[in-house]
Image: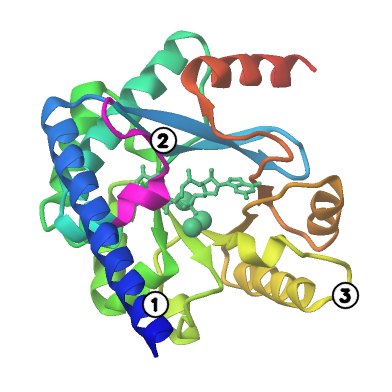
Amino acid sequence: KIQGRNRYLLFQQNLLSLSQARLRIENSLRRAINEQKGFYLEYQPKINIQTEQICGVEALVRWQDKELGSLSPADFIPIAEHTGLIVPLGYWIFEQALIDLKTLQLKGIDLHSMSINLSARQFEEPSLLDHLLALLHRTGVKAEKIDLELTESAVMRSPQEAIQTLSRFQQERMTVSIDDFGIAYSSLSYLKSLPASRLKIDQSFIRELEDGNDDYAITASIIEMGHNLGLKVLAEGVETQAQCALLKKIGCDEIQGFYYSRPLPLEKLIEFIQQHNDG
Ligand code: C2E
Ligand code: CA
Ligand code: CA
Ligand code: CA
């Protein structure tokens, strides 16, 4: 009994320190966003599996806080979403990605597209599209260079609204990718009318991908369905040559993952692209 009680106390203390940790992150996040300090972007190349050419990059935010040190998105993005801080942070991310895209263009690197993640909270902001268009205008980046990644689960929160909003992005010539696809129990009837260009198969299906196993069956089915709906299909989290070969065999269009490259800071991305194009 005493042990049970101790365990309960420990549990309560853990909860308390957990919520204290959250609060600390929230406060630092608020300060960092106000000061616009400590954030930077890394870029992970996306590779066309047939041609092995780089077909775009995905921007991923990083945070190096002066007090908390470096935090992974898994630690602060959910808090940013919960508090709404993702909205101002998201605009910073978008603007920085456009500035970096410009820098690449000035170096003679003309990427086909730059993918930017949008969380559900950002996506539901009524002024999102106007804000993005204003940033595009200000930086002189063409809308067709921008690909917006929205998770399948964010879409499924209110599919009707999502379809309307996504078609507005498409009217402005941005493309849309459905992120983390396969884990959110989409209704297939919505998928049919979704204004998107690409499905990104969630990395949980790729991790243990082997010829003939369940993940293989699911992955192959997603690829076939995606193609029948006129979508490109990308596999996330590709780490090995074997996964890459299997995905090529079953007709996957694009891959992303440590096998080709980890997310890279801009200078390293430039080196990677220049080497890749040479060799
Ligand atoms: P995501 O959009 O699904 O991004 C893919 C995550 O997988 C990234 O983690 C990336 O570093 C990681 N990854 C890429 N290739 C591999 C691989 O081969 N193996 C493994 N094990 N992992 C791989 P990261 O950067 O920690 O981001 C985690 C999540 O945080 C993202 O998942 C996304 O949901 C969110 N996030 C990151 N940056 C942003 C952003 O700028 N805005 C928003 N709204 N969310 C972001
Ligand atoms: Ca993503
Ligand atoms: Ca993903
Ligand atoms: Ca994810």
Residue at numbered disc 3: 212
Q: Secondary structure at mark 1?
A: helix
Q: Residue furthest front?
A: 2
In the current view of this chain or complex, which residue is farthest to the top? 107
Q: Is residue 206 left or right of residue 153?
A: right
Q: Could you tell me if residue 168 is visible in this image?
A: no
**208 and 158: which is toward the camera:** 208
Say which of marks 3 and 1 sits in front.
Answer: 1
Tell me the CA gap for discs 1 and 2. 54 Å
The three-letter code of the residue at mark 3 reads Gly
**Looking at this rendering, what residue extends furthest in the bottom direction?**
1
Residue annotated with mark 1: 7
Residue 91, above or below 21:
above
The alpha-carbon separation of the residues under discs 2 and 3 comes to 37 Å
Q: Which of the pair 166/32 is nearer the observer?
A: 32
Do the CB atoms of the residues marked 1 and 2 lie less than 8 Å apart? no
The local secondary structure at tag 3 comes to loop
Q: Position of residue 276 (x, y in %)?
A: 71, 21
- Which mark is nearer the camera, 1 or 2? 1
Which label sits on residue 267?
Answer: none
User: Splitting the image into 4 quarters, where does residue 147 fall?
Assistant: top left
Q: Few, some or many C-alpha atoms within 10 Å of disc 2 (few <14, some 14-19, many ≥20)?
A: some
Report the residue marked by disc 2.
145
Distance, label 3 to label 1, CA atoms, is 45 Å
The residue drawn where x is 22% and y is 40% is 89
Look at the picture and state if 147 lies above or below 233: above
Image: magenta residue range: 66-78
The amino acid type of the residue labelled 1 equals Arg
**Residue 155 shown in magenta:** no
In front: mark 2 or mark 3? 3
Q: Is residue 268 visible?
A: yes
125 on left or right of 187? left
